[in-house]
Amino acid sequence: MTFTNETVRRMFSQELLQLQAWFLYDFKLPESEIFLSDYRIVHADILGAQFTNEEPAGGKQFDFKPTGRKYQLSNDFTLAWAKRCQELNLSLNYCRAMIHLFLVHEFYHIHQFLTSDRYQDSSYAPRGLQSIDYLADACAIRGIFKLYDRHKCWQDLNLKDVPWNRKLAELIRIAVHTMEVFDVFSQGNFPITSMDDMERFLRYVQWHFQYVRAFNFCHDNVELEAFGLIDMPIIDSEIGIDFLTNGSTSENCIPSRLKFFITWRGRLYRFMSDDESFAKNLRNGIFKSDFVLSSEAIRVFLAGYPDLTGRDLIQVSKASITALEFSTSLNEKLKAVKEYASKYRVPVRSPHLLLELLNSGEVAYECFNKLVNGYGQKVQQGVKSKVDSLQKEPESGGFKEFDWFDRDEVRTAYIIALQEGASEISSKHLFLGLLLAKSTTALNLRKDLEEEKFNQLVEIAYAYTEKSTQSFRTP
């Protein structure tokens, strides 16, 4: 569909009326059936409001006049909206969803005392503004989710038969696209090439983080409220403003060992990155609106914290998760690794695990060959050389018995198997665990392949299919 300024302005008028119709319907329901408690505070503002073609005064992008209940959008803003929808090649219904989320967000701001007249000096309160914007985003997403449930709108977005967590993820993505309109408005184009506002960047990080959480959330036997959408994640990291503004030279601004923290629901989650890919994927994913790229970074972070995707073992009964076991094939490989390490009195390291997956016909061998024809044998030889060197120069202490689930690669494999809804942990999951866990082996593979091909390898591994067999839980 072609989006023009006239098209977008007409749609804003129509969708404001649609929201009012839905709100009137819900307002007439018995008290016990009104689930949109967030909207009790915006009912009065939205009902009776009307969209007008008058330009907002003072160069504002949009404005709401309580007197006369007039809602105004500038032509420059609706032009930016049309341009972003066109760039994304959105359908009419996706643009409608963007408008629904935007309107509820902005009307919620009235309750928060963040009207256009008061916005001018909000730059002096960046942390407060970030919190207010997040809450308005979250309430808009949760409210529109419930409205779409009640009024059966999911089919309009081709989401009728998907789990609730994937619906939530898609609404979050749409909400992020509404944020991008402001960057089109200020910069005149998208993708973003530079950003001098760290708080704005962190707001994007918050919602890309929530998107990946939602997409991978364990949805079985839990509902939307279990996700914790209203709880704002607080982002802290060593990513500095130079990294967002220096363009091609910005890689020099990344610490060699990047620290990244997320505080959520009273817990501090931390991540240490040994290379530049995490920060680069996060920034470029946000700047380019590439959720695959940002997901690659955030998925590595989430792999170490199963509670963030509803898979923590402490709350097994709540999420109805059954502990997964190793497939027969993987169980035999893990036993072989322990036997080798015991025989040569060496600690088990990632190369030992990877070598078991690099035999001809095995998952790693096949995935490397799909990436580059004949590459599997080359990697196999390199890993074999590394394993041999470990045998010749054993570390002090030698082999000691351990539980496989004490290892990062195996815990990551477990989480990936849960995310896929698998009935067992397979060699494929262990290979992905080796690629995504924080290990020297994974770091070396990233450097050897370079970022683009490494990401391709991860996607190839995710798409790989193998036959399941009888399962084992081995110590």
Image (tube, grey):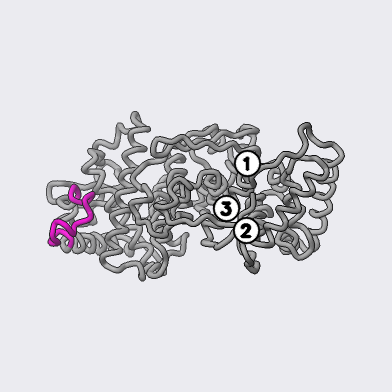
What residue appears at the point 30 percent right and 64 percent down from the top-left corner? Answer: 149
64 horizontally vs 260: left or right = left
User: What type is the residue that disc 2 sits on?
Assistant: Phe
- Residue 65 point in image, percent of width and height: 18, 47
Instruction: Give the distance between the C-alpha atoms of the residues marked 1 and 3, in whole angstroms.
Output: 37 Å
The number of numbered discs placed on residues in the rendered structure image is 3
Instruction: Tell me which corner region of the image, top left, top right, bottom left or bottom right, holds residue 113.
Output: top left
Query: Compared to 121, does 76 lie above or below?
Result: below
Identify the amino acid type marked 3. Answer: Tyr
Measured as percent of width and height from the top left, residue 214 is found at 44, 53
Disc 2 on helix, strand or loop?
Answer: strand
Point out the image quarter for the N terminus: bottom left
| Label 2 environment density (alpha carbons within 10 Å; few <14, some 14–19, many ≥20) | some
* Mark 1 or 3, nearer chain start: 1
Disc 3 crowd rating (10 Å Cα; few below 14, some 14-19, many 20+) is: many
The mark that comes first in sequence, 2 or 1, is: 1
| SS type, badge 1 | helix
Horizontal side of residue 287 vs 467, given as left or right: left
294 or 161, which lies in front? 161
Q: Which residues make up the magenta segment? A: 26-42
Query: What residue sits 18% from the left and 61% below the top?
Result: 26
Which one is in front, 461 or 106?
A: 461
Marks 2/1: CA distance?
49 Å
Q: In the rendered image of this protein, does residue 250 appear above or below residue 330?
A: above
Marks 3/2: CA–CA distance? 13 Å
The answer to whether the residue labelled 1 contacts the one labelled 3, judged by CB atoms less than 8 Å apart, is no
Across and down, in percent, residue 316 comes to 45, 51
Mark 2 and mark 3 in contact (Cβ < 8 Å)?
no
Let me know if residue 1 is in the magenta part. no
Q: Nearer the viewer, mark 2 or mark 1?
A: 2
Q: Mark 3 = which residue?
A: 414
User: Disc 1 marks which residue?
Assistant: 248
